[in-house]
Each structure stands twice: as structure tokens, then as C-alpha cells.
Image (tube, rainbow, N blue to C red):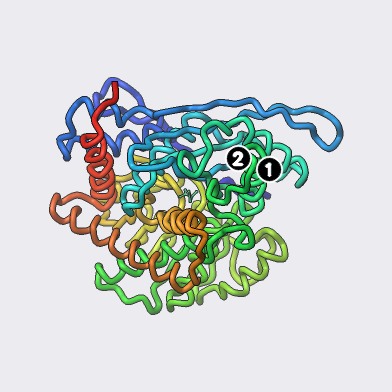
Amino acid sequence: MATDLRVPTHSIVGPDKDTFLDEANPFEAMMLRFDKAAELLDLEPGLYRVLRHPEKQIIVSIPVMKDNGEVEVFTGYRVLYNTSRGPAKGGIRFDMQVTLEEVTALAAWMTWKCAVVNIPFGGAKGGVACDPRSMSASELERMTRRYTAAIIQTLGPDSDVPAPDVNTNERVMAWIMDTYSMHVGHTTTAVVTGKPVEMGGSLGRREATGRGCMIVTKEALAHLGMPVEGTTVAIQGFGNVGSVAALLLHQEGCKVVAIGDRSRCIHNSKGIDIEDAIAWHARHRTLDGYPNGEIISGSDLLTLDVDVLLPAALENVITTRNAASIRARIICEGANGPTTAAADSILDEADVFVIPDILANAGGVTVSYFEWVQDRGGYFWTERLVNDRLRDIMVNSFNDVLTLARQHRVNMRTAAYMLAISRVATVHRLRGIYA
Ligand code: GLU
């Protein structure tokens, strides 16, 4: 039986006390954090208004001929939130939950994320509302190509560069790259990142988000004076982010005591053999049936007594309903938006050290940047060089955010937003408003 990783949320009273906000609405979650940071930065009203609005939102209908000859029509989105610092950058997800509001929030998060790690990109996100698990490979390919054709005006190495996200992967990126290249008449590798290495992808890109999580978790442990060896970790999500973070933390000496995907969560207080779990997952495409641990619920995984909790699945899993029960000392947000805005203050009160998503999972887009640079230069780096440069950026960014957090006596999330918004705002001031 499938476990829903999302925890139910409820309406909360808005800052003006008259409105009710939907705690589960990711755009509101993003805006609440944005507002707080903008106020602390004393952002001028005009710029505040500009940065609260997405630059461009595209909605397309995607007719797809199914294998049985029937035609189904899917809805696809691409949102460019802000491109002041460079080409729009951000993944494409295939998921039933995709809405314009979610994609817009995720595009804004990409804007702040690229600014936190100071790479020269703006932020975007795309998505198609579909259930990829119920589709054949050829149906997925037709849908991907038709979606690409429908948004082709925005795409390009200088304008908008997609990447993998929830339920998309290297193969989907290869179809996008090929469709775009056929339209423009020449092979354009730099139009997407997260491609197969054989066609211009970067070594280390697939592991980059999980690797970044490992790097910042180690920085947080050092900051809090906690040893790496024996640190207990619970990881929610066993996809590209969760499984790689699990493996790398395990290799660094941490004890990963819980893992989970949408089918099953496993707990083993002696520590899970992650190589073994990854091999099992590769064979069965699920953790369902994995024998080496006791089965626990998705909500129990989040409240385990561990040193580090790493949510690496979807949005809204840490909410007002469970935040007070979290026992981890550190939360490393591998997913985008796993904590609702209302849960932030509960975690602050409990002195949980949160490494916010826009910093914690920025390793992926950082190596996407490296991939784009390599494609444009036509000169490819060794995996070691990629990993070394990723480490430098993640460590420096962690310390930039920590310094700001100390200066302003705010938590890491507010500091990360302040850093990001001030970088984006500086460019807007320099560029002015074109009229
Ligand atoms: N989808 C990833 C993210 O949310 C990667 C985006 C990218 O590499 O452009 O950060």
C-alpha cells in the first residue's frame, strides 16, 4: 500500500490577522519568507513589488496520442520568475500535484537558490500535471516532445535552461535537447542540463544535489560542535537526492537509521547498509519489501530521535501538525519547500538548526551551471574538478549565510533569503527599469 508522504495541513491566520492562509500553499510559504527578509533588508517599495511578481507564466495544452490510439490532453506550465541575473534556470517535473501556483513558487525558489550560491542564473520551473507511472516510455516521450515544442519560444541557452526535477531524468532531458535542436536546426547541448554524459552532460551532475546536502550537513555538524562519526540520520525520499545523500553520509561515517520512499519507510537503529538498500531499490524500483529493518510510517520517520533529518521528497511534510514533535537537531532540506512557513517558528523555538532548501539542495543547480559552462566552452572537466568546485561553492555559501544569520540574529532560512534577495535587488538597481 502506498504511504502518502505529505502530512495534512490546515488554514492558518495570516500576518494581518484577518486573512486565512493555506499552510499548504507553496507560493504563500515562499512569500511569507520573502516578506520577512524584504522587511529586514528595508527593500524599497518599488523593488519589493517587482520581486513579488513572476516575469512570465506559460500554460500550454499538450495533446498526446496514447499507445491505445486514444488522445489525452495534459496541462503543462513553465514559469520564469526572475531573469535579472542571467538565463532562467530550473527543473521540469511530471507529477499529478503540479499546478501553476506550485510551479510559480518553485520558480521563485530557483531564483533565490541561484542567488544564494551566486551563480549567474535567474529562476524558472516547469511541470506537467500527469501520472508518469501510468504512462509507457513512448507516451512519456511524445508528451515531453510536445511540451518542449509548446514552450520552445522561451527555451535556449541564453534564455531558459531546464533540468530534471521530480519524476524527470536524463532521458527526459535528452528528448528535450533533441526536440529543441531539431527546431533550431543545430545541436544545442546547453539548452538543458542533467543530460546523459555521452551527449554533453557533466560528470557528477546526477549526484550533485545529494552531494551538496552531505557537504552542508557536515558544515552544520562542525558549526554545532557535533562529530560526523556516528551521527544518526533519517532520510525521507529515496530518489536521486535522498539515496545519494544517504550513501555519501554513510560513507562519511554517519549512521543512517531510517530511509523511506512513497511505498515504505524502514528503520534500523543499528544503521542501514545503504549500498545494499540502493542495490535493492535499483532491482525493485521501490523500497517495498526491503527486509533489513522494521517498517515504520512516513510520519514516524520524521519524528525519530535522530541528529539529522533530511526530507528529500516533496513539499509540506513538516507542518504545524508535526513540527513540535521533530526531535532532530539539524534539518537539511533536500527537497524544495518541505517545511511550511508556519512550522518555521515552531522549529526555531525548539532550537532546530534548519539548513534551508535554497541552500541545502543548491548542489544540483550548481553542477547544472558547471554543465552549461562546459557545453558552451566545449571542454569537459574531470569528476574530481566538478566535485572540488561544488564543495567550494557549498562551503562558502553555507558560511556566507551563517555569517549573515549571526549578524542579524536570524535563522539560516531568513539569512539565506536576505542574501539572495539583496543580490537580485542589487542587479535590478544597477539595470534600472526599462521603459
Ligand atoms: N530541479 C533541481 C532544483 O530544484 C535542479 C534545477 C537545475 O539544475 O536547473 O534545484
Observer-nearest residue: 290 or 60? Answer: 60
Q: Is residue 86 above or below residue 80?
A: below
Disc 1 marks which amino acid?
Pro
- Which residue corresponds to the image point at 55% horizontal and 35% vertical from the top-left? 98
Residue lying at the far front in this picture: please name it: 185
Identify the residue at the far right of this view: 68
Horizontal side of 421 relative to 332 (left or right) equals left
**Residue that appears at 72% across and 66% down:** 283
C-alpha separation, residue under disc 2 versus residue under disc 1: 7 Å
In-front residue for pair 350/82: 82
Residue 311 in view: no
Q: In the image, is 160 to the left or to the right of 342?
A: right
Badge 2 marks a residue whose secondary structure is: loop
Q: The C terminus appears in which quarter of the rendering? A: top left
* Front residue of 51 and 100: 51
List x then y, in percent, for residue 349.
24, 50
**Residue at the location (56% across, 59% down)?**
201
Q: In this view of the protein, which residue sits in the foreground, 296 or 79?
A: 79
Label 2: which residue? 95
Q: In the rendered view, tell whether residue 142 sits above or below residue 297.
A: above
Q: Does the image show residue 425?
A: yes
Q: Position of residue 382 (x, y in %)?
A: 49, 72
Label 2 or label 1, whichever comes before in sequence order? 2
Relative side of 357 to 314, left or right: left
Q: Is mark 2 within 8 Å of ligand 1?
A: no
Position in image of residue 228 (x %, y %): 36, 75
Name the residue tied to disc 1: 132
Residue type, mark 2 in image? Asp
384 above or below 199? below
* Residue 114: image tag: none
Where does the image place residue 182, in percent across and percent down from the top left?
67, 41
